[in-house]
Image (tube, rainbow, N blue to C red):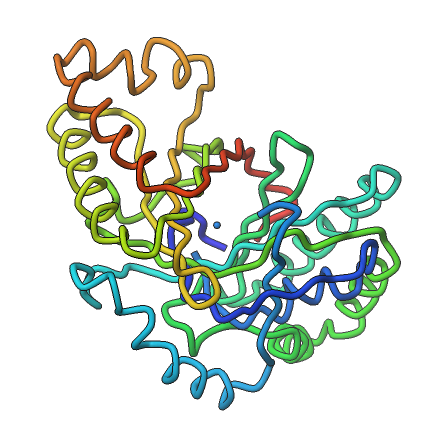
């Protein structure tokens, strides 16, 4: 998946649910039957697809649109660039090699058959040895399900190979820790698209914003993007808002290619200090933290051989 635009924040349509520990079939199905589009988590609430029927999805979208709009009046439809579905998986240590081998086989099969770009995905490994799968779409109605993938691989005359790979994954110890959709918000981002080849590393920060403070978050992030552009900060930022099932979760994703520089000489603190904007930056960060109920940080490494 062209994660190059990893940022497609979700239009989530998942509700809280839990997959029995080690139930790899359900965990992987949470990815393959994503009810939401393209594009981000841990041991807490797990978002489970509401259903795999597109008609039902449409109904859910209609019912929840008013909720999504509430408290985010400053975000217009034209501000949304793309939808991203994030699925965070924990794989038993004894099954890691087999999981990666199966995902590598799936990636090779997709490349060999030149699967349509609509079916691409990005896979990242986190600093806690989990796996984040990113799937993209232009809208909620475009969300892909397991059935969609199965039909597409069958159309490419490799349906049997696809099923064998899925079967090899089903018996593994895999748990879905988080699954939701986010939407990339252009006014919260310094770029429209990201090249994972150029920036294979990322730091994803998830903020759970207080219900009545979303507009404040919007205001502060716009200020942040403004000073990033004005000072020509070298590392791109992608801002996302959670959709159905996670609309209080706001995500900032920094993309970079050298962790030593990103954390050192070119860290945002050092950069803004040289530009005499550090105090302004610290005020923005303080304001964001002040309206956040929780904050999670994930360090991600793009795994090209497991992606498509």
Q: Residue at x 27, y 51 (%)?
A: 213
Q: Position of residue 109 (x, y in %)?
A: 69, 59
Decide: is 273 above or below 118.
above
Q: Is residue 44 left or right of residue 274?
A: right
Decide: is 197 above or below 164.
above
Q: Is residue 78 left or right of residue 17?
A: left
Q: Quadrant of residue 35?
A: bottom right
Q: Position of residue 82 (x, y in %)?
A: 34, 61
Q: Residue at x 49, y 34 (%)?
A: 297
**Nearer-the-camera pick, 273 or 156:** 273
Q: Is residue 203 left or right of residue 212?
A: right
Q: Is residue 267 left or right of residue 86?
A: left
Q: Position of residue 196 (x, y in %)?
A: 45, 39
Q: Residue at x 30, y 34 (%)?
A: 236
Q: Position of residue 217 (x, y in %)?
A: 25, 45
Q: Residue at x 19, y 37 (%)?
A: 225
């Amino acid at each position: 998946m062209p994660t190059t635009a990893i940022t497609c924040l979700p239009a989530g349509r998942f509700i809280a649910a839990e997959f029995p520990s080690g139930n790899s079939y359900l965990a992987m199905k949470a990815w393959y039957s994503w009810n939401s589009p393209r594009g981000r988590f841990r041991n807490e609430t797990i978002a489970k697809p509401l259903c795999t029927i597109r008609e039902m999805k449409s109904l859910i979208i209609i019912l929840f649109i008013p909720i999504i709009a509430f408290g985010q009046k400053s975000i217009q439809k034209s501000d949304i660039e793309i939808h991203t579905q994030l699925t965070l998986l924990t794989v038993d240590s004894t099954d890691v090699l087999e999981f990666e081998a199966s995902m590598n086989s799936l990636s090779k099969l997709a490349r060999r058959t030149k699967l349509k770009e609509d079916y691409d995905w990005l896979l990242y490994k986190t600093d806690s040895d989990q796996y984040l799968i990113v799937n993209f779409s232009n809208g909620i109605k475009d969300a892909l399900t397991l059935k969609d993938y199965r039909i597409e691989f069958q159309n490419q005359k490799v349906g049997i190979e696809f099923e064998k790979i899925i079967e090899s994954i089903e018996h593994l110890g895999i748990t879905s820790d988080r699954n939701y959709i986010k939407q990339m918000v252009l006014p919260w981002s310094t770029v429209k698209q990201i090249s994972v080849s150029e920036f294979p590393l990322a730091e994803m920060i998830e903020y759970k914003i207080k219900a009545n403070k979303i507009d404040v978050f919007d205001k502060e992030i716009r200020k942040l993007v403004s000073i990033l552009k004005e000072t020509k900060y070298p590392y791109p930022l992608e801002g996302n808002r959670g959709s159905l099932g996670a609309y209080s979760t706001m995500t900032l994703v920094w993309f970079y290619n050298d962790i030593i520089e990103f954390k050192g000489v070119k860290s945002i603190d050092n950069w803004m200090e040289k530009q005499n904007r550090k105090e302004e930056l610290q005020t923005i960060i303080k304001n964001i933290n002040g309206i956040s109920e929780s904050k999670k940080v994930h360090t991600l490494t793009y795994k090209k051989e497991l992606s498509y």
